[in-house]
Image (cartoon, rainbow, N blue to C red):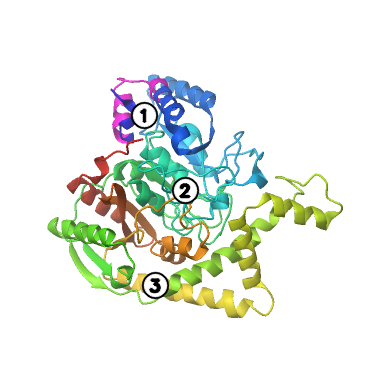
Amino acid sequence: MELTVLSLFDAADLLRRHEISSVELTQATLARIEQIDTQVNAYLTVTAERALAQARAADERRAGGETHPLLGIPLAIKDVICTEGVRTTAGSRILENFVPPYDATVVQKLKAVGAVILGKTNTDEFAMGSSTENSGYFTTRNPWDTTRVPGGSSGGSAVAVASGMAFGALGSDTGGSIRQPAAFCGVVGIKPTYGRVSRYGLIAFASSLDQIGPFGRTVRDAAILLQAIAGHDPCDSTAINAAVPNYLESLELGLKGTRIGVPDEYFIAGIQPEVESAVRKAIDVMDSLGAAAHRVSLPHTDYGLPTYYLIAPAEASANLARYDGVKYGYQHPDAHDLMDQYVRTRGEGFGAEVKRRIMVGTYALSTGYYDAYYLRAQKMRTLIKQDFDRVLENFDVIICPTTPTTAFKIGEKTDDPLAMYLADVFTLPLNLAGLTGCVVPCGFADGLPIGLQIIGKALDEATVLRVARAYEQATEWHTRKPGV
């Protein structure tokens, strides 16, 4: 039996029935990483010895009568999430040797239920990017076609799950950084409601937009992971103190009577014809399963991109001010004075995209420009959120494409930042509104996956997952595996 092709749910079932051990599962996954990661570069750090020790501990816990779907399951963690005693770089040279003294809350929760942590996955530097080409270390490659990007910024996590190098993974989503790579790599990705999952221990990019979420090979896998990490956390002042439902209980309830809104603004000029066709066919499938789809309007959608690229860089400018070579991280060794140290440390430690966003954000916040740019962007953010709220008063979910195209070639957009930013045009409005969204595979074009985006009300991940699961079970797209 080829263990690494199993879903998380099926692997957990074999563990539960004692047909395999966590050590065997972990060894098989580590062997898979050793075999193919040189082709796709998903991992920045592999913690093989720690993982095997955790697997042995999981087997002992199971032998003692413990049960949990994640007990003994090998997982990967995006390298913007702190892990005690394990290097956490945020994909940046400025944190090349940073080893956190604590675990992020989500990592604590995974360890508490006995999950096995395989290592840390590659990311665009400080999660700023749409292709994982902005990593300070190397470019991650799409397992469906290694000449193409996997999406970003959580490209490493998406690739690890898609190519059998982890049974699930955590990423972060600030403007689409879980959903876009999920679409490009043919896996399931969930962006939870802002505040549904603790951000304690997440290296901040844009604090009002960032949210941690899971990747899985199936909707059920992703739901299991979300169940484990969701919930209030006193360490995070933005974490919502609301009960977390049992996502698996409602997962198989189907689509009968579900009201679906299809926004006109998400089917725009320039969208790849195969992407639009696949999404519209997916909506037809949902109609055949008992849902009712209707056209709706989100009129401020066109303002999402400029609004996001004022708010996110402004927050990044503030958050990244701490990397100055004084307390931790890279410090230039030959600075003449304090100002010289700041300039040379940040100049050498940050990559081009991070510098670009810091400069844009600092400008937007500067005296004389704050009202003209940042304040106006916040007002537009409110209008964008009101658009979603108005539609979701009458509909259970909104269905739309995740990306305008399938995965693009490595290097194709690196010299044109605006073209790169447009890759997130369908995902970033959701972060501005703070709502939840899920991506599930819905087709292929020239051998590359296409992702369907399902958007739901705040804290209504259960409905989003139910809709995604019903569609997934009515189609076979999720069963396909990349050739790597």
Within the magenta stretch, is there residue 16? yes
**Residue 225 can be seen, yes or no:** yes
Q: Which mark is residue 215?
A: none
Can the viewer see residue 461 in this picture? Answer: no
**Residues shaded magenta:** 9-25
The residue at the far right in this view is: 336
Residue depicted at x 77% and y 49%: 326
Left or right of 405 in this view: 261: left
Of mark 1 and mark 2, the one earlier in the sequence is 1
Q: Is label 3 or label 1 in front? A: 3
Q: Which residue is mark 1?
A: 67
Which element carries disc 2, helix, strand or loop? loop
Q: Residues within 10 Å of mark 2 (few under 14, many from 20)?
A: many
Q: Is residue 101 above or below residue 363?
A: above
Q: Is residue 404 above or below residue 170?
A: below
Q: Quadrant of residue 35?
A: top left
Nearer-N-terminus badge (3/2): 2
Please state which amino acid type lies under the numbered disc 3: Thr
- Residue holding disc 2: 154
Amino acid identity at mark 1? Thr
Question: Looking at the image, which is closer to me, 55 or 230?
Answer: 55
